[in-house]
């Protein structure tokens, strides 16, 4: 058993978080993680406000444990989705990519706000804005890590801020949990590892691809959804890297997203302008690029199209070798971490 500031703050048994993953961290997986003692996050960036509310209520039917939501703040629908999560008094609100305007509203009902950062100087800013804890994403991670690896980023941030830290990027077993605690974190967040569990909706073809991948089998670049990010090395991902940005596809994709999310043209333009003003200065075309990336991502997840699909995935796929239940995985990570810590200083010449 590990008692850390993370387990204490969120009222959970184990210092393990299910990273928010659009389309993947749905109610069933979230509840499975919570019931196994971790903290499950429902990713709501793809949801309409009504879907967000329904999913939150579904989770509450499947578990009485604390859980959270994850929302990318720069996309369409972020304001409406966060408002629903606040109305529903979700215990943990985790955001990425943007500035939180809702900290006081979450604190008012006793909830916690968890910011996600990939650059050390953003950690101090997030704490100033009122975040209760931070997810620190290293370069190894699936999707949007920046240049620094977890090994470098965690101790730097641990020396800068006093709030609980959750290490993300490259963690898939108990040795990683022990290492994260040693580096100054209070627990870990796992994305890629939780894609390959029984309760995950990821198509078997991609689960097998993750299991077969080595640590060399991911690609990092900004062509996949417009921001620097990491995906599994598929045929389509390699082709995207080679040919650069597909302008026509991107506009088609952006219009599709507009339709799916029921946005008026005025709203669509408003969101785009907001994105121009976002902290990292994301260009207007990011939305269009995201649309293309999302379509290929969805194709991978639901159809198992290993030729035409792309899947965000981290370097730690090289260490993933099985498809356990969520509970088996969490119990195993905890017992491996206990063993790793016990063995650390046990060598006798
Ligand atoms: C398929 C997939 C989808 C993701 N979607 C999101 C998302 O919607 N919001 C977000 O903040 N991070 C997202 N991420 C990043 C994860 O939250 C997490 O930071 C990352 O997976 C950690 O690295 P790891 O894969 O090495 O564990 C996604 C990751 C994957 C693999």
Image (tube, grey):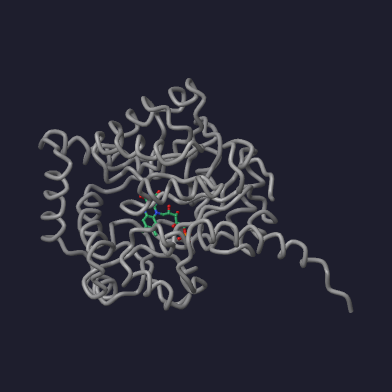
Where's ligand 1: which quadrant? bottom left
* Left or right, 345 with reference to 253: right
Q: Nearer the viewer, residue 206 or 272?
A: 206
* Left or right, 55 with reference to 20: left
Residue under the image location 52 percent in, 63 percent down: 170
Residue under the image location 19 percent in, 52 percent down: 288
Q: Nearer the viewer, residue 207 or 116?
A: 207
Q: Is residue 248 above or below residue 122?
A: below
In the rendered image, the residue lying farthest to the right is 349
In the rendered image, the residue lying farthest to the front is 61
Residue 139 point in image, percent of width and height: 48, 61
In the rendered image, the residue lying farthest to the top is 108
Quarter of the figure that contains the C terminus: bottom right
Q: Nearer the viewer, residue 54 or 149?
A: 54
Residue 345 point in image, percent of width and height: 82, 66
Residue under the image location 20 percent in, 58 percent down: 295
Residue 110 point in image, percent of width and height: 52, 24
Residue 234: quarter of image: bottom left
């Amino acid at each position: 058993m590990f008692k850390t500031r993370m387990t204490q703050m969120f009222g959970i048994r184990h210092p393990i978080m299910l990273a928010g993953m659009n389309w993947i961290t749905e109610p069933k997986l979230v509840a499975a993680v919570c019931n196994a003692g971790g903290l499950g996050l429902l990713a709501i960036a793809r949801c309409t406000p009504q879907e967000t509310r329904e999913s939150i209520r579904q989770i509450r039917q499947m578990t009485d444990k604390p859980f959270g939501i994850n929302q990318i703040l720069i996309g369409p629908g972020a304001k409406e989705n966060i408002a629903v999560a606040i109305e529903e008094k979700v215990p943990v609100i985790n955001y990425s990519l943007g500035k939180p305007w809702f900290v006081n509203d979450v604190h008012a009902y006793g909830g916690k706000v968890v910011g996600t950062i990939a650059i050390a100087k953003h950690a101090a800013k997030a704490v100033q804005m009122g975040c209760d804890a931070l997810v620190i994403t290293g370069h190894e991670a699936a999707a949007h890590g920046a240049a620094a690896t977890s090994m470098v980023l965690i101790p730097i941030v641990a020396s800068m801020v006093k709030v609980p830290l959750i290490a993300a990027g490259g963690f898939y077993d108990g040795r990683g949990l022990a290492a994260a605690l040693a580096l100054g974190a209070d627990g870990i967040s796992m994305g890629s590892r939780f894609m390959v569990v029984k309760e995950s909706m990821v198509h078997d073809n991609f689960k097998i691809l993750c299991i077969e991948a080595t640590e060399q089998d991911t690609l990092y670049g900004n062509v996949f959804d417009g921001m620097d990010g990491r995906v599994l090395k598929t045929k389509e991902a390699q082709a995207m890297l080679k040919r650069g940005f597909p302008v026509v596809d991107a506009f088609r994709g952006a219009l599709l997203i507009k339709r799916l999310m029921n946005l008026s043209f005025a709203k669509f333009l408003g969101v785009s302008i907001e994105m121009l003003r976002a902290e990292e200065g994301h260009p207007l075309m990011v939305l269009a690029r995201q649309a293309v990336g999302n379509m290929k991502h969805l194709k991978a997840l639901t159809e198992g199209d290993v030729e035409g699909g792309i899947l965000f995935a981290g370097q730690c796929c090289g260490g993933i070798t099985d498809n356990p239940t969520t509970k088996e995985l969490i119990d195993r990570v905890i017992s491996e971490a206990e063993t790793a810590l016990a063995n650390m200083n046990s060598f006798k010449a």
